[in-house]
Structure formats: C-alpha cells, structure tokens
Image (spheres, rainbow, N blue to C red):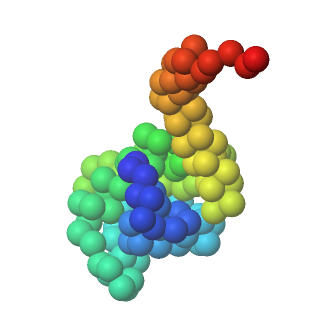
Amino acid sequence: MKLNLDKDGLEMVLPPWQLELMRWIWRIGREVDSRAAYNHLQESPTPMSRASAINFLNKMVEEGYLIYRETTTKGGHKRLYKPSPTAPDEESFRKALSQRILEKVRTELEGDTTERFSRTIKRKPPHS
C-alpha cells in the first residue's frame, strides 16, 4: 500500500475501486470468490479486470485485512475471501491501518528525528 497525501480518508491508501470492493465485502457479510468480486466491479463506476480483482484480494490477505479458505471445484481450486478478525468492518480496518501507518512512520523516522534533535541541542548556545 502506498500513502497518497493528496487524497482524503481511505482513498489515501486505496484507489476508489479497491475501496468499493472492500466496502462491498464488509457489507455482504459472507465469503466471496474472485468471480463475484469481478462481477461486482463490472457494475461499479470503475470496472477492473478479473486479474486486478484477484491481485487486490490476495494483497489484502497478505496485509492481514482479508482471510480466505480454499475450496475444490470442478475446474480446480478457488479461494473464498472474507474480512479478517483484524478488519471485520470499515471502522476496524481504519483503526488497524492507522496504527500500522503510525508505527511505520515512528519506526522509520524516529532515529532520524532523534539525531536531528540532538544536533540542534548541541548547537544551541547556553543561557546566561
């Protein structure tokens, strides 16, 4: 996920079609396969390819926001996706995502910030 500071809300991290797909998954409250996700996107303002839908669903699994179970069908195997316990709804997703972003920023910038602060303190003249 990339953070786009020019956008607002969840669109800072998810393009509109991905946000629409996640909201749909939360709303329907049952497992969905990639075909159902693809079909839903075809009815949205920004239809996407089935490959895009599959890649996004799998990315959300990797990120821990969706889980899946694999089932066997006539044509082979397919994944059935549903919200993870970490993000069972949009509010939980927002909280989990914001915690993740804040922790990443703190971890990545803390050393740099501490070093700059230390240099500033060293340069500051003593008070009389």
Camera-side residue: 64 or 128? 128
Residue 27 figure quarter = bottom right
Q: Residue at x 43, y 52 (%)?
A: 3
Q: Position of residue 23 (x, y in %)?
A: 55, 69
**Front residue of this view, candidates 96 and 115:** 115
Q: Residue furthest right?
A: 128
Q: Looking at the figure, which quarter contains the C terminus?
A: top right
What residue do we see at 28% from left, 50% from top?
A: 76
- Between 84 and 109, the one lying in front of the other is 109
Q: How many marks?
A: 0
Q: Where residue 19 appears, x then y in whole percent?
A: 47, 67
Q: Is residue 95 above or below residue 22?
A: above
The spot of residue 30 in percent (x, y) is 59, 64
Which residue is at 69% across, 60% downward?
91
Height in image: 28 above or below 51? below
Query: Residue shown at 51%/23% (left/top)?
Result: 116
User: Can residue 72 be seen from the camera position used here?
Assistant: no
Location of residue 114 (image quadrant): top right
40 on left or right of 48: right
- Report x, y in % for residue 35: 34, 67
Q: Is residue 111 left or right of residue 71?
A: right
**Can residue 24 be spotted in the picture?**
yes
Of 52 and 79, the residue lying toward us: 52
